[in-house]
Image: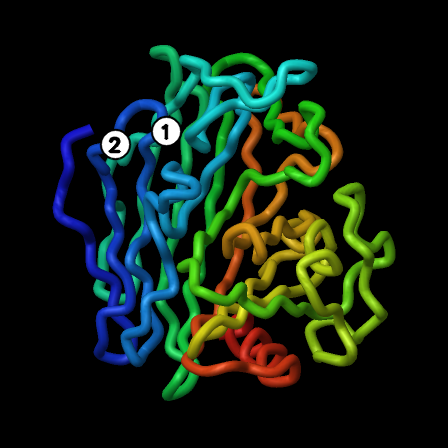
């Protein structure tokens, strides 16, 4: 891909993100558009790209480790009974153009290709929404259509035999700091944290706050209305903004590295028939300072209904 200048995203009169459409990355990084840096309204960075611990992590975007055996995540591929293996199976998310590009958001068309084959067509919408004087929201929706002419399925390392690693879909890599971020969330769904081995939640009242769940183990793999990371002077609150998105468990890392994403393929592969389209929407509150559970819940309600 030929690098292009980033597209600037603004909110409340301030630059809050830059979007790279055609990154100049090696094939094994699974080149794809991404947002970085993303900042709070006060200018504090809350994303990281190409970190030493996972050089294929690229700020905020959409990444899937297994689309019919093709890697759109970057790095090694987890293969059942073999482990993580370096394979020549990396795909590319090609930026085809903007249908709309305003200072506070854009509508983008992309094509996911691998091995010379068009697999998926994506329609992506990104918007920056002002919430308060210290918080804004990044609203990201992606719609993926199977254009391969055959049935496909989406998998993850978890569905390929690695428990607890059901990443794939929306993903946000946060900056690594000397101390791991605090993790907390709303109350989880009735089935708790699913198959990822978390310890579950202690009830709670969903998006209205309540007791919720605390800690990486409790939130990782949970089906919750929202989850939060709170670092040094910043808080990120991730919310599934549609009923179908809220059915996807959350993938959460804090101790090893700070990152939150959705799990399109949690305990089984996600089938995508020829011509079929599926849609996910995640709204992320980006706040200065340390939010408590009630504050996070209030901003989520405002962000999702804005």
103 sits to left or right of 182:
left
Callout 1 environment at 10 Å: few (<14), some (14 to 19), or many (20+)? many
Residue 50, quarter of the rendered image: top left
265 sits to left or right of 125:
right
Nearer-the-camera pick, 125 or 177: 177
Q: Where is residue 116 in the image (x, y as percent from the top left)?
A: 34, 11
Nearer-the-camera pick, 143 or 8: 8
Counting every numbered tag in the picture gives 2
- Taking the spot 55% from the left edge, 44% from the top edge, the residue there is 279
Q: Is residue 130 above or below residue 132?
A: above
Look at the numbered disc 2 and give the secondary structure of its residue.
Answer: loop
What scheme was used to colour the molecule?
Answer: rainbow
4 sits to left or right of 172:
left
- Taking the spot 69% from the left edge, 30% from the top edge, the residue there is 162
- Taking the spot 69% from the left edge, 73% from the top edge, the residue there is 207
Residue behind mark 1: 30
Callout 2 environment at 10 Å: few (<14), some (14 to 19), or many (20+)? some
Q: Quadrant of the N terminus?
A: top left
Q: Which residue lies furthest to the front in this view?
A: 178
* Label whose residue precedes the other's in the sequence (1 or 2): 2
Residue 41, quarter of the rendered image: bottom left
Residue 153, quarter of the rendered image: top right
Mark 1 and mark 2 residues within 8 Å of each other at the beta carbon: yes
Q: Is residue 218 above or below residue 55?
A: below
Q: Where is residue 109 in the image (x, y as percent from the top left)?
A: 32, 39
Q: Position of residue 77 (x, y in %)?
A: 52, 23
- Taking the spot 31% from the left edge, 41% from the top edge, the residue there is 33
Q: Where is residue 68 in the image (x, y as percent from the top left)?
A: 55, 18
Residue behind mark 2: 25
Look at the numbered disc 1 and give the secondary structure of its residue.
Answer: loop
């Amino acid at each position: 891909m030929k690098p292009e200048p980033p597209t600037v995203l603004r909110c409340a009169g301030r630059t809050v993100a830059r979007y790279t459409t055609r990154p100049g990355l090696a094939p094994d990084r699974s080149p794809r558009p991404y947002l970085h840096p993303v900042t709070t309204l006060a200018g504090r960075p809350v994303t990281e790209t190409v970190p030493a611990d996972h050089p294929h992590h690229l700020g905020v975007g959409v990444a899937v480790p297994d689309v019919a055996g093709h890697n759109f995540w970057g790095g090694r591929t987890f293969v059942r009974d073999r482990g993580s293996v370096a394979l020549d199976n990396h795909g590319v998310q090609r930026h085809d153009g903007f249908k709309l590009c305003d200072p506070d958001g854009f509508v983008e068309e992309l094509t996911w290709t691998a091995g010379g084959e068009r697999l998926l067509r994506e329609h992506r919408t990104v918007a920056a929404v002002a919430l308060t004087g210290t918080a804004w929201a990044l609203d990201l929706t992606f719609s993926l259509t199977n254009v391969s002419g055959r049935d496909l399925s989406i998998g993850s390392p978890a569905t390929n035999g690695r428990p607890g690693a059901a990443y794939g879909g929306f993903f946000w890599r946060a900056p690594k700091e000397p101390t791991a971020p605090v993790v907390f969330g709303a109350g989880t769904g009735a089935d708790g944290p699913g198959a990822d081995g978390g310890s579950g939640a202690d009830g709670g009242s969903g998006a209205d706050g309540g007791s919720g769940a605390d800690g990486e183990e409790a939130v990782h793999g949970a089906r919750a209305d929202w989850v939060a990371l709170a670092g040094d002077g910043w808080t990120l609150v991730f919310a599934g903004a549609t009923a179908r998105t809220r059915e996807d468990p959350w993938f959460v890392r804090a101790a090893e590295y700070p990152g939150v994403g959705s799990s399109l393929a949690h305990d089984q592969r996600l089938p995508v028939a020829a011509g079929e389209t599926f849609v996910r929407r995640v709204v992320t509150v980006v706040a200065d300072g340390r939010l408590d559970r009630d504050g996070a819940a209030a901003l989520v309600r405002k962000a999702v209904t804005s």
